[in-house]
Amino acid sequence: MTKTNRIVLDVLNGAHAETPPIWIMRQAGRYLPEYRETRKTAGSFLDLCYNPELATEVTLQPIRRFGFDASILFSDILTVPHALGRDLRFEEGRGPIMTPIKPDEIDSLSDIADFHDRLAPVYETVRRLRSRLPRETTLLGFCGAPWTVATYMIAGHGTADQAPARLFLYRHPELMDTLLTGLAERSAQYLARQIEAGADAVQIFDSWSGVLDEASFERCCIRPVRLIVDRLSERFPDVPIIGFPKGAGSAYDSYRQETGVDALGLDWSVPLSQAKRLQKDSLVQGNLDPLRLVAGGNALDEGIDSILTALADGPFIFNLGHGITPQTPIDHVQRMIDRVRSWKGA
Ligand code: CP3
């Protein structure tokens, strides 16, 4: 292993860290006043995602303010279906809105020729980030896992339980396989371009893997992510891949081996005893409940301490168990970082 002195990258590659490195999901976002300012000048959320100068700026904001150990490209998981020609907009308070894809539209997705041209601004953002980030900051690229992306393409918006996508799966299993395999191939190419542009490691967000039964989890979450990992490992064997199958519960136990990801992002419902077990086989990342960070005080301190007591000795990256919420007070974020960085062992 070659040490890069990028601590997140080094621990992903097996180095030991005295103090756990830290970054947080959605670290560029609405809890930051400077983000809200830039967001106003950008126009829509998607305009911001496709504007390399402004997307670079908002990615750098949490690094400047807090000095996180990793920076995650500012974009969205739904740029992939957008670049495949699906319409997409973000509505205040409602989140993403798309026209639900119909079964007879799935085959034609593979015909889209200008996929990478449409994503060129994202690749340009990655290049600018690598040249402007501090040398020691790890740059993470990302994509949505095919299942999670498919749930939005099928429902056309967020839902509580992804019933439309689950029904689609049971009614049209072959078409679902076609959709997921197509998304996996495109996502692998998308991540490959991010890596070529300068990403040190990548994370695959499967935010909705928790709504599936056992057989469907295997079919819709494991298989497509395995395909992405296989494609990337052929070309970039040294670039670590973090999988985040939110809500996977006991399925976390076999996820790493079955998908081939290098590290596991844990949501906050994963018990620390299970996390410790998982850590024997791979690096784990997580898993503070984002609402402890909103509440602050003892709820925050106790949450941090129990995670560090259980996990800080092993291969570990401190993070939240899901994205930071807009109502989070900024001083709580600073308090969390200080507490993690001053950790001296249990
Ligand atoms: O982590 C980061 O800082 C990088 C940026 C990032 C965003 N979205 C920015 C964003 C990342 C990694 C994502 C991933 C993403 N996007 C996921 C997977 C992770 C998760 O949170 O479960 C999902 C499911 C999406 C789709 C999506 N994008 C939804 C459902 C929403 C609406 C919810 C919300 O918070 O408003 C978004 C919008 C979004 N993506 C925002 C940001 C900063 C807020 C939009 C705004 O600023 O107006």
Image (cartoon, rainbow, N blue to C red):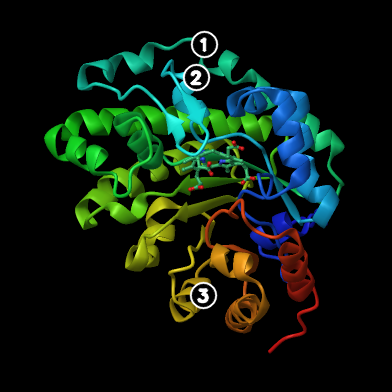
Q: Earlier in the sequence, mark 1 or mark 3?
A: 1
State the image quarter where residue 152 is shown.
top left
x 39%, y 37%: residue: 146
Is 329 on the left-hand or right-hand side of 44?
right
* Mark 3 closeness class: few <14, some 14–19, many ≥20 residues within 10 Å: few
Indicate the position of residue 31 as horizontal and vertical percent values.
Answer: 68, 50
**Which part of the image, by quadrant, shows the N terminus?**
bottom right
Give the answer, above or below, for where 7 lies relative to 226: below
Q: Quadrant of ligand 1?
A: top right
User: How much space separates mark 3 and mark 2, taking CA atoms?
Assistant: 39 Å
* Residue tagged 3: 280
x 38%, y 60%: residue: 247
**Which part of the image, by quadrant, shows the C terminus?**
bottom right
Using the image, tell me which numbered label, if any, was put on residue 114: 1
Using the image, tell me which numbered label, if any, was put on residue 26: none
* Mark 2 closeness class: few <14, some 14–19, many ≥20 residues within 10 Å: some
Q: Earlier in the sequence, mark 3 or mark 2?
A: 2
Using the image, tell me which numbered label, if any, was put on residue 83: 2
Q: Nearer the viewer, mark 1 or mark 3?
A: 1
x 64%, y 32%: residue: 194
* Mark 1 closeness class: few <14, some 14–19, many ≥20 residues within 10 Å: few
Indicate the position of residue 82 as horizontal and vertical percent values.
Answer: 47, 22
Report the front residue among 50 and 221.
50
Amino acid at pointer 2: Ala
Q: Nearer the viewer, mark 3 or mark 2?
A: 2
Amino acid at pointer 3: Lys
Secondary element at tag 1: loop
Q: Are marks 1 and 3 in contact (CB under 8 Å)?
A: no
Is 225 on the left-hand or right-hand side of 180?
right
Amino acid at pointer 1: Asp
Secondary element at tag 3: loop
Report the front residue among 79 and 183.
79
